[in-house]
């Protein structure tokens, strides 16, 4: 029997745990959260769904991105891979996907997260593994 919880979610938005973000931010010094809400933003400068972070110029910022984990995730990863500046992403560890092989594998630094992380104020850990992907830009 298939566990549908492994493949679906009530939301595509998963709030980055503060401890994880703070550690990465101390290493990279992020300037903008390119995909956030007012409630879950991690940087003073941030773009919401209404702002449409995909349409913004990421090249002049050191970017943090925890994108929606739905069918559109590949668009966020592609944009990050094309940035001229640093983009660090928290995404599901889906090494069997086209977006992983097209934009990440052998093109970015990958840090697999041991165990399952707990997003935001959720009671349970995520039903999937996660990874940090670091695109160092072309500049």
Image (tube, rainbow, N blue to C red):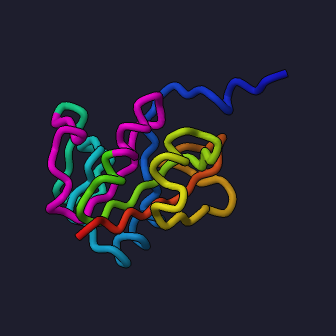
Foreground pick, 66 / 86 = 86
Q: Using the image, determine if residue 101 lies above or below residue 44.
A: above
Residue at point 23%, 43% (across, down): 38
Report which quarter residue 126 is drawn in: top right
Residue at point 60%, 62% (across, down): 112
Q: Which residues are magenta?
A: 51-78
Res. 52 visible in picture: yes
- 60 left or right, relative to 106: left
Report which quarter residue 64 is drawn in: bottom left
Foreground pick, 78 / 9 = 78
- Image coords of residue 55 (percent x, y): 18, 38
Residue at point 67%, 28% (across, down): 5
Q: Using the image, determine if residue 57 lies above or below residue 68.
A: below
- Image coords of residue 26 (percent x, y): 35, 77
- Looking at the rendering, in which quadrant would you find the N terminus? top right
Foreground pick, 28 / 135 = 135
Foreground pick, 48 / 79 = 79
Res. 124 visible in picture: no
- Image coords of residue 127 (percent x, y): 66, 40
Q: Using the image, determine if residue 130 lies above or below residue 26.
A: above
Direction bottom: furthest residue: 27
Direction right: furthest residue: 1
Whether 115 is among the magenta residues is: no
- Image coords of residue 49 (percent x, y): 24, 33
- Looking at the rendering, in which quadrant would you find the C terminus? bottom left
Whether 57 is among the magenta residues is: yes
- 20 left or right, relative to 118: left
Q: Using the image, determine if residue 131 lies above or below residue 122.
A: below
């Amino acid at each position: 029997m298939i566990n549908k919880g492994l493949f679906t979610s009530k939301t595509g938005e998963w709030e980055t745990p503060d401890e994880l973000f703070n550690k990465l931010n101390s290493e990279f010094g992020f300037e903008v959260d390119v995909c956030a809400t007012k409630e879950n933003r991690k940087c003073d400068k941030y773009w919401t769904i209404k702002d449409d972070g995909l349409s913004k110029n990421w090249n002049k910022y050191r970017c943090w991105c925890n994108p929606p984990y739905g069918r559109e995730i590949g668009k966020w990863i592609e944009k990050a891979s094309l940035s001229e500046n640093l983009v660090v992403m928290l995404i599901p560890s889906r090494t069997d996907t086209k977006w992983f092989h097209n934009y990440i594998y052998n093109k970015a630094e990958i840090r697999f997260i041991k165990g399952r992380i707990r997003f935001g104020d959720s009671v349970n850990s995520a039903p999937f593994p996660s990874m940090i992907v670091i695109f160092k830009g072309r500049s």
